[in-house]
Amino acid sequence: MRHVLSFILLLLLVSACKRSESLPPAPAPAVHPVPALPMAATTTDAEDPILATVNGQAVTMADVRMALRLKSPTDDVPEEQIEPLLDGLIRQELVAQSAAQLGLEKDAHYQTDLAIASAPLNAFRRRALGDAYFHAQAAKLPPVTDAEAQKFFEDNRETLASEVRVEQFLTRDLAAAEAAHKEILAGKSIGDIARAAHPGLPVTEKPWELAWQPWQLVPEQWRAPLAKMKPGETSGVISGPKNRYWIIKLLERRPSQTMDFAQARAGIIERLTAERTEATREHMADPLIGAAKIVRHKHVAKAKVDLEP
């Protein structure tokens, strides 16, 4: 978390400085004032101790690290540099407070720079607080009951209590997966493509052809397409974690010889819990919108912002 905040603060400082240098000295058009952000975070966290206060405004170790990073890209502050950097920050804070007392923070150029430089920090605030709100709401969700799991099993018995046998083409290259899919559409089989990729493979070996798999052990990413496929049909490109891409062909499907609700129960509860949790994340803003006052303003369609460091 400390590294994320340090990066954001560095981006704010550099962005503000660069934009200030590019602005003309002539008076700028009026803009809507943006509330000024605290110039230093007030915290008692052990990783970011308060090193000084200037008229009540905290200067923390994170501020010292930031001052050093403006000179050198590092988070490690040598002990002998802490006091000189802190002295400089105290002086800067005094000057900034004096500028605010003179009303200079109302300057249109400053407000424009502040609005632009604040965007990364606002994005972090929305994401971090949004995650916290989501976890708070998810913690209130009722657990999936056995009755719900049993109903889901009965409604999906044909799929859940089944086994499948498939062929798979697996690669970590999306372009290769898309090329293989085009070849399959043109008439090649998964076996043809896989064997061409391994020319020294004995004729009797077919590692792309998998043994019977109970539905509960089928990779999660395969389940949606497999549920709709008939024997002999081939999927499109399926993406998975860690840059894995599959194309699968359903060879056979049969009722499971062993699967019953007792065996499927844990997997069903896990699945329904995940679906309930994801639905909470997707719709958690819905009840808030109705009670909010939202005003949409006209905007320039092709706004251009200098994001260079």
Image (spheres, rainbow, N blue to C red):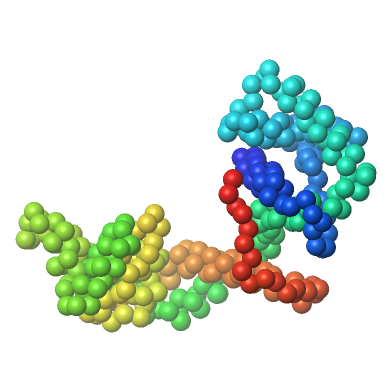
| Location of residue 304 (image quadrant) | bottom right
Q: Looking at the picture, does residue 275 appear above or below residue 204? A: below
Residue at image point 24% right, 73% down: 182
Residue reaching furthest left? 203
Residue 116 location, x and y as percent? Answer: 70, 55
Q: Is residue 234 visible?
A: yes
User: Residue 59, how many percent across, how many down?
Assistant: 79, 33
Left or right of 227? Residue 195 is left
Count numbered badges in the picture: 0
Instruction: Please tell me which residue lies in front, 109 or 145.
Output: 109
In percent of the image, x 45 and y 65: which residue is there?
267
Q: Residue at x 79, y 42 (%)?
A: 39
Q: Nearer the viewer, residue 160 or 292?
A: 292
Q: Is the C terminus in the top left, top right, bottom left or bottom right quadrant?
A: top right
- The x, y position of residue 100, in whole percent, is 89, 45
Residue that protrudes farthest toward the top in the picture: 80
Whether 112 is drawn above or below 13: the answer is below
- Camera-side residue: 113 or 148? 113
Q: Position of residue 26 (x, y in %)?
A: 79, 54
Can residue 124 be seen here? The reply is no
Q: Front-most of 298 and 142?
A: 298
On screen, residue 188 versus residue 60, left or right, reads left
Which residue is drawn at the image coordinates 63% and 31% (left, top)?
71
Work out which quarter of the rendered image holds the N terminus and state it. Answer: top right
Q: Is residue 132 left or right of residue 186?
A: right
Res 285 → quadrant: bottom right
Residue 143 sits in quarter: bottom right
